[in-house]
Amino acid sequence: MMIDRNSPIPQYYQLQTWLVEQIEQGIFKPDDKIPTEEEIVEQTGLARATIRQAIQNLVNSGYLIRKRRLGTFVLRPEKDQGKKTIIAVMVHDIRSGYASEFLRGAGDEAARNGYSVLLCNTDDLYVHADFHANQILNYGISGLIYMPTAASAEKNSVIVDRFRRRDIPVILFDREIPGQNLDFVTSDNYRGAYDLTCFLIAKGHRKIAITLSTIFSSENARFMGYRQALADHGIPVDPANNFTFQERLIESPFEQFARKILAHRDHYTAIFAGNDAMAHIIYRISREQGIAIPDQLSLVGYDDLPVTNMHRIALTTIHQPIYEMGQESMKLLIRRMNGEGGEPIRIELRS
């Protein structure tokens, strides 16, 4: 058991990964007792708190079970009792037009195949995803479609591993989890952002600000598309116009951030908002400040949600095939539930 103390990977996670590998490879079999804390301390020199964190994560993930006075054992996976017809879908925010459109596509496809959908709303929080995972694993489901939360890759991996441990197929949509090789359904965010930036350039803009969260793979791809479009037109990327952030800003914090963006309006002539919800907030605050869109400032969004039609002028946005993403996610999940094996599949629909 080797722990790399110079690695940026947390030591508890290194131990956790090693234990999972021993279980998956059959070295530790169901009902086997794993080494005690004392034995792991002797082998690794890790602190007891670090060891307990790794073991508790694996208990939460369904790999291990603690037995009082006996120790910690590999949990035997539960056997399915007949065919279950419930599929769980975990979304980031049920209030968003994105989630409702995705669910419509997934739900329609599920119904066509005799399945029902169990909806779980995470509010983009790991603690909510963890709660729902506990509930639906006890409830009994056939498969999971999961939009990773704004938490770390390690925490999102804990969620999906709990289902995979029980041989429940998992499909990710819109956001990938670094280090997890799973079936994934998305749209071509890079191309969509590239085309939208080229649209602004064709309108005469050379100073284009961008705001989005680069913690999500989908929005990070949009950022890359934006940068490439500028480069292909010989326009240098201006750091002063980069309003990206490394977190999820819900409505009130993003309102404050939007005011900061608009305070630097002399640096740019157009704003590329990473999604329509952001564009909607920027539009509203611009009106409050007497900034006329599009006469004084051009603004574009991404997703083509109904919110873009709520303004006095229709905002330019990139259409994302969200309904179709829901359909394709469900189709792929049903194939996996019906026993189709093979390497993980990536489905990327054109925006």
Image (cartoon, rainbow, N blue to C red):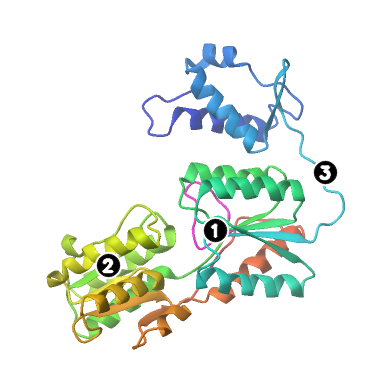
Whether residue 325 is visible, yes or no, is no
Disc 1 target residue: 147
Left or right relative to 193: residue 74: right
Q: Nearer the viewer, mark 3 or mark 2?
A: 2
Residue 227's place in the image compared with 75, above or below, is: below
Residue 193 lies, in percent from the top left, at: 35, 72
Residue at 28% over, 61% down: 256
Furthest-left residue in view? 266
Assign a secondary structure to mark 1: loop
Instruction: Identify residue type, mark 1.
Output: Met
Q: Amino acid at mark 2?
A: Ile
- In the displayed structure image, the side of residue 78 where residue 88 appears, left or right: left
Judge whether 317 appears above or below 31 on screen.
Answer: below
Q: CA distance from mark 3 to mark 1?
A: 26 Å
Q: Which residues are magenta?
A: 172-182
Residue 97 to residue 242: above or below = below
- Numbered tag placed on residue 79 in the rendering: 3
Asked if disc 1 and disc 2 are in contact, CB closer than 8 Å, the reply is no
Q: Position of residue 46 (x, y in %)?
A: 47, 18
Left-right relation of 27 to 264: right
Confirm whether the magenta stretch covers residue 174: yes
Q: Of all residues shown, which one is farthest toward the front?
A: 288
- Front residue of 232/306: it is 306
The disc, 1 or 2, on the residue closer to the chain's N-terminal end is 1
